[in-house]
Image (tube, rainbow, N blue to C red):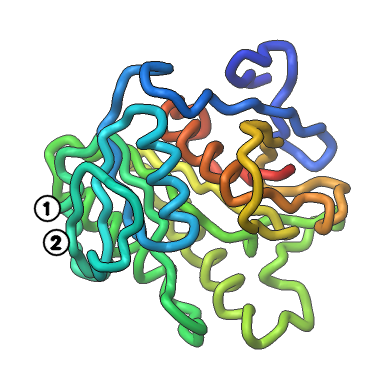
Amino acid sequence: MPLIGSLARCPLLWSQESRPVEVRGRPAIAGSVAAMRLAVIGAAGRIGGKVVAEALGRGHEVTAVVRDRSRVVGRPDHIAEVDVFDPGAVAAAVERADVVVNAAGHAARLDDADFYARAARSVVAALRTLERPPRLVVVGGFGSLRDAEGQQYADRPGLPANVAPEIVGQRDALTHYRGVDDLQWTYVSPPPGGVAPGERTGAYHLARDTIGDRKASSTSISLEDYAVAVVDEAERAEHLHACVVVMR
């Protein structure tokens, strides 16, 4: 059974019958691992900004890839103003990166369920043009996750109209990534309990494709700890071609 990080005796959750493990992220200090070059698409967003801050805190070189450079918070090493739906511009912005984090999101109410799948297709097309494509870590959604009955959240009846396009759209984006076998990618889902600003504890639980028998309300996690998990995966590459969910 696969093992994770320093918790070599704890199994990672691969199925609904297994149990998740607690993972404690690397400290946010320079020098904990070899410095990498990260490009964060959507770096001005609420999750992308936290990923940038976490990566900079660990001493990595960060390029913020954004639609509007005036919205960038903090001091990334480089800023590239790019439309995520322009594969050529994306490729030029990330060609030096070791890892690309795709945290692209919508700026306001989402009424286009195809937004995330189109963004996925564009980023994948961009990486395929590069001689040495970087790894891809995707800030995803929870629509593809399965509940205790095995049903995907995107297929549950009665999804609120204001969130259904995002839940379904993120699930459809993962469907596209699952068909990509010529690039190294990992899809990191937030939990159905949600993410919100809070404390960076450095601890989280990981599971693959499902929250098991946990109640959704028990899975919520801080934006800060979600960003820890994203940067951990960028550093460690432990869950290639897989969807993992980060939970409290």
Contact between labelled residues 2 and 1, with CB atoms less than 8 Å apart: yes
Q: Residue furthest front?
A: 74
Residue nearer the viewer, 59 or 147: 59
| Image location of residue 177, percent across then percent down | 43, 54
Q: Left or right: 239 with respect to 29?
A: right
Q: Give the SS element for disc 2.
A: helix
Q: Name the residue type under label 2.
A: Ala
- Residue at 73% across / 22% down in the picture? 11
Q: Is residue 168 above or below residue 56?
A: below
Q: Please give the residue where the numbered disc 1 appears in the rendered image.
A: 92
Q: Give the SS element for disc 1.
A: helix
Q: Quadrant of residue 194?
A: bottom right
Q: Quadrant of residue 42?
A: bottom left
- Residue at 46% across / 84% down in the picture? 112
| Disc 1 from disc 2: Cα separation | 5 Å
Q: Left or right: 81 with respect to 209?
A: left
Residue nearer the viewer, 163 or 148: 163
Q: Left or right: 21 with respect to 198?
A: right
| Label 2 crowd bin: few (<14), some (14–19), many (20+), radius 10 Å | some
Q: Which mark, by number, is residue 89?
A: 2
Q: Name the residue type under label 1.
A: Ala
- The quarter of the image holding the C terminus is top right
- Residue at 16% across / 52% down in the picture? 93
Q: Which mark, by number, is residue 2?
A: none
| Label 1 crowd bin: few (<14), some (14–19), many (20+), radius 10 Å | some
- Residue at 69% across / 49% down in the picture? 221
Residue nearer the viewer, 29 or 24: 29
